[in-house]
Every structure is written in C-alpha cells, then in structure tokens.
Amino acid sequence: FVTADRPARLRLTGANQTTIQPGIFPLIKYLDTATSIPLSNQWSDGPFQLNIQFDTPLVDDYGVDWISQINFSEVSETKEKEIPKDSIEIAGKAIVVVGHDKGNLSADQINQFIKENNFPAISEDPFLNRELIPHASLILQDPKVREILKADTVITIGRTTLSRSINEYINLANHKIVIDQKLESVDIKRSADLLLIDLPKIKNYNANQNFLELWKKASHLMGGVIESDKSWSESRAVKTIFENLAHEHEVFVGSSRTIREVEGVIDYQKCSATFNSFANRGLAGIDGNISTIFGIAQYSRKVLGVMGDVTFLHDLSSLLATPANPTTLVVIDNNGGGIFNTLEQSNAPHFEEVFGTPHNRDLASLARGFGHKVIEVVDEISLQQALNNQEDFFKIIIIKVPNRNSLLQFLKDRSDYFCKEFLIGANLA
C-alpha cells in the first residue's frame, strides 16, 4: 500500500507536518523513495509499504509518466547529534524567536530569559507576554526588510511552524542557536550552530539598542498599517475578536489560516484581557479542533475557540456534545481553504477542486441542526455585539468574510505599502 510523506531529509529536524513513517507498521516491509532500487524486485516480498515523498510546493509539472521517475531505498537509522549544555557567549545583534510549542519550556522561564538579557523577541504565540515585538511574520515578508533587520545571532526556542518569512529570517543569521527540550528524543536532527535542551546563561552580552529600536519602529509602522485598514477581512475579524475579549476566557486558535492571522495581526498590548492560549500544532492538521475546545472547557471558567470553516466542518460531529462550561465558538467562513490562496498553489490548474475545496454549505444551518445557538455576523459592529452577549452558555458565531480570491491581493497590498514606508524610513528606498 502507498503512503504520502515529506522528504526523508526533514525527519527529526522539527520541520512542519513531518512525522516518522518508517516502522509504523512493524510487520510490513518498508520502501523509501530516495535511491534506485527496481520496484519489480520487491513484489515477491510483500506486503510492503511504499512511502512516496513529496517536496514543496507540489505544483511542478512532472509529466504523465511520473511513476517511472520514482526511486527506492531501504530506510536507514540516523545518528543523534551531541547536544551541548554549557553557558554561552554571544555578540552583536541578537534576537529571540519563540515557536508556538515553546520548546516544552514554560512562558515564565522564557520571559525571564528575554528580560534578563534585554533581547528583542518575537513569538508565534503573540500572547506570550506584552513586551514582545508584534507583527513579525508580516514585517519580514519582503527580503529587503529581512536583510535590514538581519541579526548576527538568532536564538530559536522550540519549533517555528507557522510562517515562511520567519524561517527565512532565521536562516539569514550568521549564528543560529536552537533551544528545545525535544532535542533529546524527537527533533534530534535540528540544524543550528548550537543545540541546547535548556535555557543557557548568557555571559558578557551587551544588548544592541539600535537594533532593538529598529525592530520597534518596524513593528509600530506595521501596527499602523493594520489599524488604518478598516475593510472587512479575516485580519479585521481576528483583531476585533481579541481586542474585545474578557479576562476570564481561555483561548483556542484553530490551525491553518486562522492561527497565522492571530500571529500576524495581534498586538497583545492592545488586548485588555490576559489569557492562556492553546493550539493543536502537532503535524498542523485540522483534526479534532472542536473536540479540543470542549476538552479545555472541562477545566476552564470560559473558553473562546476561533477557527476556519474547513476546520469546523472537519470536526462537525463533535457538536453532538455540549461543553462543560460557558464556551463561544467563532468560525471564519470564506468558503474553503483560505491558506492555499496565499501560497504558490494559488495559480495551479484546478486550484478550487484540489486546494481551495469550497464547501458551499450553510454553516449556520448545519450548526443549528445540532441544537445549538448560532449567530451570523457580516461586519465589525455585529461581531462586537455577538461577542459581548454573555447570556448564552454555548454559542457559535459564524463570521462571513469576503471571497478567498481577494485574500492574496489584500495581503500583498498591505505588505507592499509597509515595505515602501519602511525602506523610506531606513533611507533605502
């Protein structure tokens, strides 16, 4: 039987959406698509698992006879890297980048590390602390901006799985340090100049104040760009949700486009509430998001869950249950998989059928069919009203946003305007 996989070189490296498929069926012979072994020689040894590796962006034209181009090899064991544990010295411009999983470290540990060393810090989870530099994934979209903000040393804590712009920025650094407790067992092939499993002591470091101020200026400019655009969009909806959230809530953010909007547009300093955030990162799938929200509600006073329409439909049967504590489920409906409209696949043949996957369903009617309260909103005012209504024990808010086809142009226009203004301010236009 045939399984789909990412390239073998990405295993154990912390790469997004990558798991270890060799050996998951221990009684079946395993074949990798890597080096040449004639497939015909293997038929008599069955049953076997044929693991086909696909590289990004899955849009190249390989021709009709693609199967003849597949190569095969037996899986081989990999060696663990030695993981240094000493205190370290760094110099020049340094920045901390925190992945959503935080490397299995606590928020308090990370925040203390950042504060002690006066590092500028960006995070995939914007709710880590109020001193973070917001909007980093949007700021770094243009390569010219990335070059201006380039760091001598990037200290990455955990896995960065959300934005290509941040990973490309990390790769620019002269010196890369990874801190992640999972290095001992899960991501043992992470690539960096230094791999650590605990937060180190930093010796003799003098923070570069000009570098910090440049990042703050970039963040302030991007914040102004986001604030000035009053058009109704996913970004505006996400911003409205979190700036109107009450203190007692716990927050769950769904996978795919939703979590990237939260990462990019939210400035925690503009949120009046403080709250814990949750997300199913794992392999970045959309399975079981509603179930996870209901699980959080077992132990929380109030819960807010935010997700996209395809994620919602993927776990629709969980609505047979009712959360144990007051819960609001917000669904952003743009009729399909919006994230693919922002990627290379957006111009691929048959995009809508293969990637966009429009559902063409009335989500409100589906949710009401499970007996739940549903509120449909179409603008910022109606969304604020729905969020502020505290009377319902459990309610589902369906947010209708513009068609996905306008999303890529919206994001490009925002990025282009920011880049132009930033380069003028840096005298590099």
Image: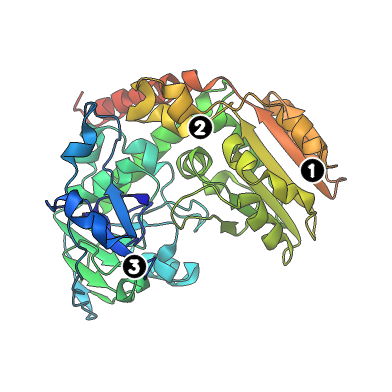
Which residue sits at x=49%, y=38%? Answer: 257
Q: Name which of mark 3 and mark 1 comes first in the sequence.
A: 3
Residue 395 vs residue 136, the one in the foreground: 395
- All told, the count of numbered labels is 3
Query: Which residue ends up furthest to the right in the rendered image?
Result: 391
**Quadrant of res 110:** bottom left
Q: Position of residue 307 (x, y in %)?
A: 60, 42
- Residue bearing the label numbered 2: 337
* Position above or below: 171 against 141: below
Kindly identify the amino acid type of the residue bearing the numbered disc 3: Gly
Separation (CA) of disc 2 from disc 1: 23 Å
Which residue sits at x=73%, y=27%? Answer: 377
Q: Name which of mark 2 and mark 1 comes first in the sequence.
A: 2
Separation (CA) of disc 2 from disc 3: 32 Å
Kindly identify the amino acid type of the residue bearing the numbered disc 1: Lys
Residue 133 vs residue 138, the one in the foreground: 138
- Residue bearing the label numbered 1: 395
Badge 2 element: loop
Kindly identify the amino acid type of the residue bearing the numbered disc 2: Gly
- Residue bearing the label numbered 3: 23
Q: Residues within 10 Å of mark 1 (few under 14, many from 20)?
A: many
